[in-house]
Image (cartoon, rainbow, N blue to C red):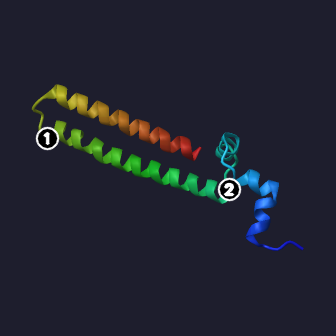
Amino acid sequence: MRTLSGDEGSSDPDCYSLMKPTFRNTFASLWSRPDPVLAQASVAGELLVAKIRLGLATVLLIIPVIDSLFFPVEPKEAIVGVSLTAATFLLSAGCLFSDLA
């Protein structure tokens, strides 16, 4: 029967090899499979971030559309604003729907 004293842990070669920080141990731990619960939580977090990103892009898209409809001072400015925020919106929507698939 093994006891849990501090002296025996240092004589065990397996324990020493796990605790020694080497490049191989670090690299292997980075590429190991994640815990299934942690992987599921990360997927849920990514979907939440994608939904928030799409909501913010929608709010940003409303601003130049309202500006170009009600205050048409500079048409080039409105076209640039709408096109850039529409591209942001489409990119955000593409990221969200690719995560759902």
Q: Quadrant of the N terminus?
A: bottom right
Number of marks: 2
Observer-side mark, 1 or 2, equals 2
Label 2 Cα crowd, 10 Å radius (few <14 / some 14-19 / many 20+): few
Given the current orientation, which residue lies at the most extreme left position? 73
Amino acid type of the residue that numbered disc 2 sits on in the rendered structure = Asp
Residue 76, placed above or below residue 66: above
* Residue pictured at 12% horizontal, 34% vertical: 72
Element carrying mark 1:
helix
Residue at position x 26%, y 44% in the image: 62
Q: Secondary structure at mark 2?
A: loop
10 lies above or below 5 = above
Vertical relation: 50 (above or below) 73: below
The image shows residue 47 at horizontal and vertical percentages of 51, 51
Residue where numbered disc 2 is placed: 35
Instruction: Indicate the position of residue 48 as horizontal and vertical percent values.
Output: 48, 54
Residue 11 at what x, y percent from top left? Answer: 80, 60
